[in-house]
Amino acid sequence: MAPQINISPPLLNTSSPWATTQSDLSNLYALPSTGAVSTRTSFLTTGFPDDPSIHQHAFISPSSSLNTYGYSPHPLPYYLTSIKSILAASDQPQRKPFIISITGSDEEVVSCISLISKWTSENSIIAYAEINLSCPNIPDKPPPAYSSPALCKYIASLKNLQATSEVDIVPIGVKTPPYTYQLQFDELISAVEQYPGVISFITATNTLGNSLFLTNDVDDGLKPVINSAAGTGVGGLAGESIHPLSLGNVFTIRRMLDASANGDVKDIVIIGAGGVRDSEGYKRMRKAGAVAVGVGTAFGRDGIEVFDRILKSD
């Protein structure tokens, strides 16, 4: 059985540009209305080569967003050091877990999980690892979670790590892209059923790729609202526009997990994310089967106060 996660209150930030720095994470950790803090997605040893001229975001009225970001400019060790510093600055025991978002090849991800697990063991820190297999904005690197063989390769490598690690492995989650037809859901469930006891949680969903928004420029007419590496302005859609799709993903994945004949698969929980901006969206995600609810676009648009507003209205 995979280790269980605990997020209380069941509200948190998603991995996003607004969780990039130690200061960002410190502010989220201090907030009573977040039950966990997610970091921005990082690589094992190097930062993502962020270029503000092509990695951008825009808020689309009334409450959606489009972005062409990649991953964090900081590598994994930056986040481990930052988390340790945040906890050391407090005179209280750790109040909530950190969800450390990582990505890379299956070998790199295994190294990340091994490093995080050893670090948590040595420092008595509560943390989970979320593997981002769903970013749509990396040229020539389609999200692995859309490919059954690729997804199985990751989970199989993690299964082997569990069997060989000298320390307990932290709870592991997978962040999935929005699925739009049944075969995609079938392949996800098949992958976790082939390697039960590895995955503790699924975060559904990331942004929806291949999205474009044009805005009217007085001089040049309609133009992409943001730039991108390809120069097209095509990126990942988030916020209210994908809320029904994300909600449907949470609902479908939860039903399929519950229908599994394997008890370890039934025990996998879902963090619901996608277009939650108020208490109504939060309640819908919980009703659909999310054990906790992540907020991204509304956090970036409205600031950290959005978490208090969502919970106070619940």
Image: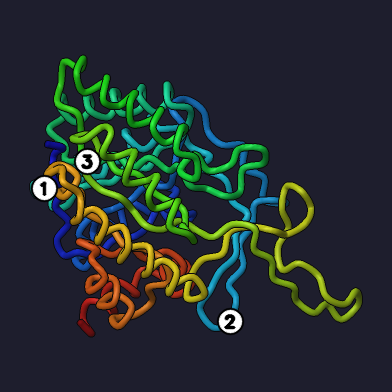
Q: To which residue does mark 1 refer?
A: 91
Frontmost of labels 1 and 2 is 2
Q: Is residue 32 or residue 313 the one in the foreground?
A: 313
Type of amino acid under label 1: Asp
Q: Is residue 142 left or right of residue 280?
A: right
Question: Measuring 14% from the left and 48% from the top, which residue is drawn there?
Answer: 267
Answer with mark 1 or mark 2, whichever residue precedes in sequence: 2
Q: Is residue 113 left or right of residue 269?
A: right
Q: Is residue 7 left or right of residue 191?
A: left
Answer with mark 1 or mark 3, whichever residue precedes in sequence: 1
Q: To which residue does mark 3 refer?
A: 127
- Quadrant of the drawing holding the N terminus: top left
Residue at the far left: name it.
93
Type of amino acid under label 2: Ser
Q: Is residue 252 or residue 205 the one in the foreground?
A: 252
Q: Report x, y in % for residue 75.
A: 45, 32
Q: CA distance from mark 1 to mark 2?
A: 42 Å
Q: To which residue does mark 2 refer?
A: 61
Question: Measuring 40% from the left and 32% from the top, which residue is drawn there?
Answer: 76
Marks 2 and 1: in contact by CB < 8 Å?
Answer: no
Task: Tell me the number on the disc at residue 34.
Answer: none
Q: CA distance from mark 3 to mark 2?
A: 35 Å
Type of amino acid under label 3: Ala
Position of residue 269 relative to residue 190, above or below, is: below
Q: CA distance from mark 1 to mark 3?
A: 19 Å
Q: Is residue 155 or residue 24 the one in the foreground?
A: 155
